[in-house]
Image (cartoon, rainbow, N blue to C red):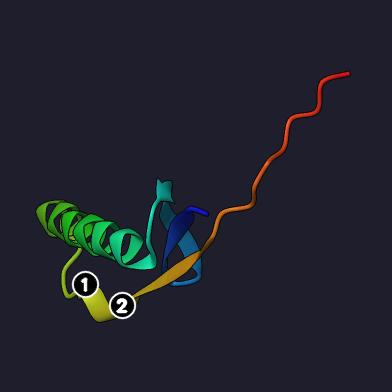
Amino acid sequence: MTYKYEIWLDGNMVAFDEGYETRNEALEFAQENIMGKIEYYNENGVENVTPSDFTVVIDEEDEIVEVEE
């Protein structure tokens, strides 16, 4: 089983990624992604964005089973 994360800001999904072995690994990468987004926003004139402004959703990935005909 693998996990994915979604990062939301003001009701908009701003990032997602998948393929993590544990929930903690997905959360760690999501937090790193958030810090990168904050740095980007600050460099581009968007001020007062903090980690608490983001919502992180971590969930199990749907398994896709390929069927040969």
Which residue, given by chain and number where applicable, does mark 2 sit on? Answer: 53
Which residue, given by chain and number where applicable, does mark 1 sit on? Answer: 49
Point out residue 14 in the picture as x, y percentages from the top left corner. 41, 55
Point out residue 62 in the picture as x, y percentages from the top left corner. 64, 52
Rendered view: 28 above or below 68:
below
45 sits left or right of 27 in the view: left
User: Quarter-wise, where is residue 53 in the image?
Assistant: bottom left
Determine the residue located farthest toward the top in the rendered image: 69
Mark 1 crowd level (few <14, some 14–19, many ≥20, 10 Å Cα):
some
Determine the residue located farthest toward the right in the rendered image: 69
Residue lying at 20% horizontally and 58% vertically, measured from the top left: 32
* Label 1 secondary element: loop
Q: Quarter of the image for the C terminus: give it.
A: top right
Point out residue 58 in the picture as x, y percentages from the top left corner. 45, 67
Residue lying at 43% horizontally and 59% vertically, measured from the top left: 5
The amino acid type, in three-letter code, at marker 1 is Val
Rendered view: 45 above or below 56:
above
Point out residue 63 in the picture as x, y percentages from the top left corner. 64, 47
Label of residue 30 in the image:
none
5 sits left or right of 62 in the view: left
